[in-house]
Amino acid sequence: SSQAPTTIRVTTSMNEKRLETAASNGSGTVAKAFQIIQYVTSSARHSVTVSEIAEELSLPRPTANRLISNLIKLGMLKRDGGGTRIIEGDELLHIAGDVLEGAASRGPRHEILRQLVIDTRETANVGAVSSGQIVYLDRVEAIWPLAFRLDVGSRVPLHCSAIGKVLLSNMPQAQRRKYLDAMTLSRRTDNTICARDALEAELDNIRDTGVAFDNEECFEGVIGIAVPVLFKQNQHSMGLALVAPSARQTLEGLRDFLPAMKTAAANLAKCYPD
């Protein structure tokens, strides 16, 4: 996440409504803890201090300290880099991923993926960033004797997967830099891009073109293509990909499916509330 301004405020009407609803549902410990989690996670790309949380939620400073300490112990929150600013915790991210995974497999979202597989005859999946990796939230397999299969919930690195690269490329520069500083550009195959400069150049190109390729960079014999799923104001937190064995498909062949993928990505975005 990028560096936070001195004062953090929840500015969107939706976030204000959520906080007001939490406040009106009771003043007990659980309700207050829920308010804190909502406020921290509503401050997108920013970390907040205990003082800011206490002031925004009208909590006594000792109460805020106690609740935040307990939430940190539970993994719901954590201190950004071990400092004084508070961000979402690893356990909370895992829970969020599980919730997204379950939600993604229901209703029209799964049907959109199924239709894309019918149209392209290739395996389609949706993924998001969770704890520094890509987690697959939903997946529909192509019916081929030769196919590549990973279960929903599987995780792959950011730097060498098509979805990982497309999401990295569209991050704000400061956020992208923090991810690249923290991650190890480990070699998965002979084609994995392990040099920082080369990867950044590729990410800049992906940002310009809006499409990322995996040229057997994550798994030998597997290629892929990904586009972002764009939400309101072109924000995105998910990517849509097609993957195929390189023995049967080519990158240029996958590129031919871009119109269908972009249509599917736009339809997926409509399935999620603003």
Image: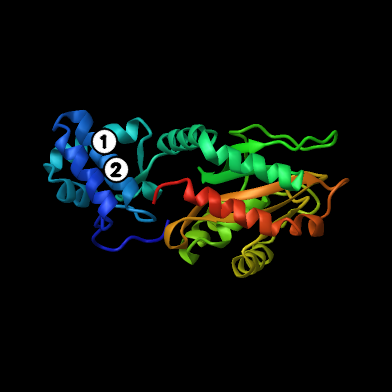
Element assignment for label 2: helix
Amino acid at circle 1: Phe
Q: Position of residue 269 (x, y in %)?
A: 50, 51
Which quadrant holds residue 155? Answer: top right
Whether residue 141 is visible:
yes
| Location of residue 141 with respect to 203 vertically, above or below | above
* Separation of residues labelled 1 and 2 (CA atoms): 6 Å
Q: Residue at x 15, y 50 (%)?
A: 55
Whether residue 165 is visible:
no
For this view, does 56 lie left or right of residue 154? left
Which residue in the structure is indicated by mark 2?
38
Say which of 101 and 110 sits in front.
Answer: 110
Please tell me the numbered disc located at residue 270: none
Say which of 248 and 264 sits in front.
Answer: 264
Which residue in the structure is indicated by mark 1?
34
For this view, does 96 lie left or right of residue 42? right
Numbered label tally = 2
Whether the residues at callouts 1 and 2 have beta carbons within 8 Å, the answer is: yes
Q: Position of residue 227 (x, y in %)?
A: 62, 56
Amino acid at circle 2: Gln
Image quarter in which the N terminus is found = bottom left
Say which of 67 and 265 sits in front.
Answer: 265
Check disc 2: other Cα within 10 Å, few if <14, some if 14-19, many if 20+: some
Q: Position of residue 139 (x, y in %)?
A: 64, 37
Q: Residue at x 14, y 43 (%)?
A: 61
Element assignment for label 1: helix
